[in-house]
């Protein structure tokens, strides 16, 4: 019975250490969103250097609370720092046991897969999908407006020859 109580006490203590809020710092200015989506309403703008408390994680998003407000920000915009460093928490021990010890830097990768020969042979024309793809096109003025809003700079390049 003592073993069960001890195990329960240890589990409660460790879960408290795991769920305690982490702190962090904004690496760059970024929008604090109402929800963890790129197109969600912006609550406020975080500035580089703003201190935050990390409350939750959802995919590539962190829910944070700052002096400016509470919301979601892209996790690559925040540098995590343990607010309780040196206070004897269990995070170092847990990192070793999970094999996650190290720098804590995030690495993102992207994979691209092409079509194999069988998929190309089986491909069929789909007018609905073609129209859907064409619906994403923007006019030259729309593209210029978008580029200006993102402070993008035009770079000239040679176009492919028109198909015959």
Image: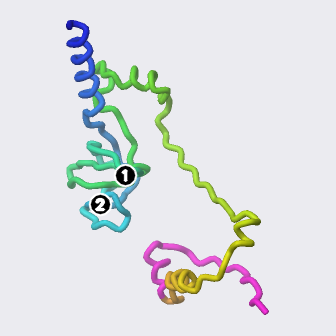
Residue 117 figure quarter: bottom right
Q: Image height check: is 95 above or below 150?
A: above
The residue sitting at 57% across, 83% down in the picture is 130
Question: What is the distance, in whole Å, between disc 2 and disc 1 at their CAs?
Answer: 10 Å
The residue sitting at 36% across, 59% down in the picture is 30
Residue 9 x/y as whole percent: 22, 17
Residue 94 x/y as whole percent: 39, 24
- In this view, the residue farthest toward the front is 122
Residue 159 on the magenta span:
yes
Residue 6 x/y as whole percent: 23, 11
Q: Which mark is residue 33?
A: 2
Q: Residues within 10 Å of mark 1 (few under 14, many from 20)?
A: many
The residue to which callout 1 is attached is: 61
Residue 121 vs residue 33, the one in the foreground: 121
Residue 147 x/y as whole percent: 49, 77
- Residue range (magenta): 142-164
Residue 73 on the magenta span:
no
- In this view, the residue farthest toward the bottom is 164
Question: What is the chief secondary structure element of the magenta stretch?
Answer: loop
Element at label 1: strand
């Amino acid at each position: 019975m003592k073993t069960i109580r001890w195990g329960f006490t240890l589990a409660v203590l460790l879960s408290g250490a795991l769920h305690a809020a982490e702190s962090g710092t904004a690496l760059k200015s970024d929008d604090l969103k109402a929800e963890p989506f790129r197109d969600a309403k912006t609550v406020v703008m975080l500035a580089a250097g703003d201190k935050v408390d990390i409350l939750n994680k959802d995919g590539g998003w962190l829910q944070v609370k700052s002096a400016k407000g509470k919301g979601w920000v892209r996790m690559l915009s925040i540098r995590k720092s343990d607010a309780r460093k040196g206070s004897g928490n269990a995070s170092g021990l847990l990192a070793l046991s999970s094999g996650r010890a190290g720098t804590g830097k995030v690495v993102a990768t992207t994979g691209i897969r092409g079509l194999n020969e069988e998929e190309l042979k089986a491909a069929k024309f789909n007018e609905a999908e073609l129209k859907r793809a064409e619906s994403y096109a923007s006019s030259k003025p729309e593209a210029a407006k978008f580029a200006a809003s993102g402070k993008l700079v035009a770079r000239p390049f040679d176009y492919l020859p028109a198909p015959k």
